[in-house]
Image (tube, grey):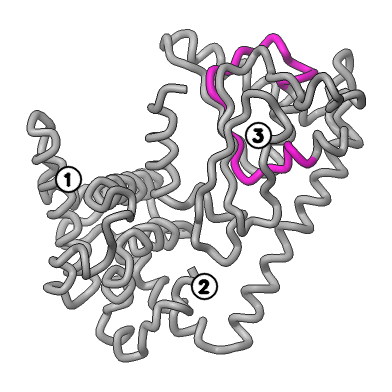
Amino acid sequence: MADVLAHASVSPDQVEAEQVLVSIARGSLQQAIDLLALAGEGDDEAEPRALTELVAFCARAGAYWAYQTAEGSLGDGAEFFAWLRAVDEDEEFLDRLHEEVADWEQRTNPTSVRRTPASWESFGVADGLPGRTVRAVYRLRALNVAGRTRPVAAGLRRWGARPAARLMGDVMGYFAERGTVATPGSIVRLISASLDEAARDAAERDEPLVVLAHSMGGNIVYDVLSHFRPDVRVDLLVTVGTQVGLFEELKLFASSNATLPNQHQSKVPALPNVGRWLNVLDRSDPLAFAAGPVFEGAEDLVFRTGAWWAHGAYLTSSDFHARLAGRVRTPV
């Protein structure tokens, strides 16, 4: 959020006039939607249902943006969405965005139930905008003001080193304690139990088993599926911002074969218990590596988060989930 706001040229006058989101949306509506979803996090006072409603609205708004602009290829901001020129304040922008999304949904799917303003108010307040959304906008305004000072910006960037340090600790801790098939370590047991539970639920609902793993989670899931639990069948594996390709080239997995690659086989064979594997990475993410050049069957997808610390920005982006859903629906 700090990085986007620092480059959004939101003036102090616009902060006072409650025009932070409006200013960003006029440059990129998609960026404003993602910021709204991200700013809604960390609100300890909000009910879980309020978070769900806010995220759901941002996902709908992201789908509206993607459809109207052909995922940004046709344009964005006020130059494409003329209605952005007619709104002056953040709350007015959110009301109008809600109307535009609902109208679009009705036009593209006339049989759907139109979401009325009453459903918008179901976020948790009787009148006006949902409380969580209002607090999210307040956080954006406060961060925009704070982010204008060099010490705060420097502190935010120093913060980015923390996830990298934690990742190194996670890596060393996991590989030192993962155990064996006969006596698996605590992390392997935990992930195995979660996979078993998810598989049972999927079977009961007659649904595919989909596993999404981020960062070190992707490394662990691959290790478990390839060595400890090859009996678990996963229909779709999605790894996001992971180091699976790097770790295989370093031969760190329990299933790693030091004789691969060779002149007869250029890649590691695909996992027989995984139906499809999508590996998502942002090229500006220093902790994300491609899997396609290393593994047969791995499909690398590039997603630009637009964040200064891309590694933590995938899953908080509503556009990421919309694009992933679209890719999942695409036949192999």
Q: Is the Cβ of the residue at disc 1 closer than 8 Å to that at disc 2?
A: no
Query: Along the line of sight, which residue is nearer the eye, 177 or 29?
Result: 29
The quadrant in which residue 231 appears is top right
Marks 1 and 2 sit apart, C-alpha to C-alpha, by 33 Å
Query: Along the line of sight, which residue is nearer the eye, 272 or 136?
Result: 272
Q: Which residue is mark 2?
A: 3
Res 57 seen here: no
Give left or right: position of 215 versus 116: right
Label for residue 326? none
3 vs 1, front mark: 3
Residue 220 position in % (x across, y down): 74, 32
Residue drawn at (74%, 38%), measured in percent from left and top? 245
- Residue type pointed to by label 3: Gly
**From which residue to which does the magenta span run?**
225-246
Helix, strand or loop at label 1? It is helix
Residue drawn at (9%, 40%), measured in percent from left and top? 107
Give left or right: position of 146 versus 9: right
Residue drawn at (73%, 37%), measured in percent from left and top? 244
Marks 3 and 2 sit apart, C-alpha to C-alpha, by 31 Å
Marks 3 and 1 sit apart, C-alpha to C-alpha, by 43 Å
Classify 114 as above or below 146: above
Residue 35 position in % (x across, y down): 40, 62
Q: Which residue is mark 1?
A: 119
Q: Which residue is mark 3?
A: 292
Q: Earlier in the sequence, mark 3 or mark 1?
A: 1
- Residue type pointed to by label 2: Asp
- Residue type pointed to by label 1: Ser
Based on the picture, tell me whether residue 230 belongs to the magenta stretch: yes
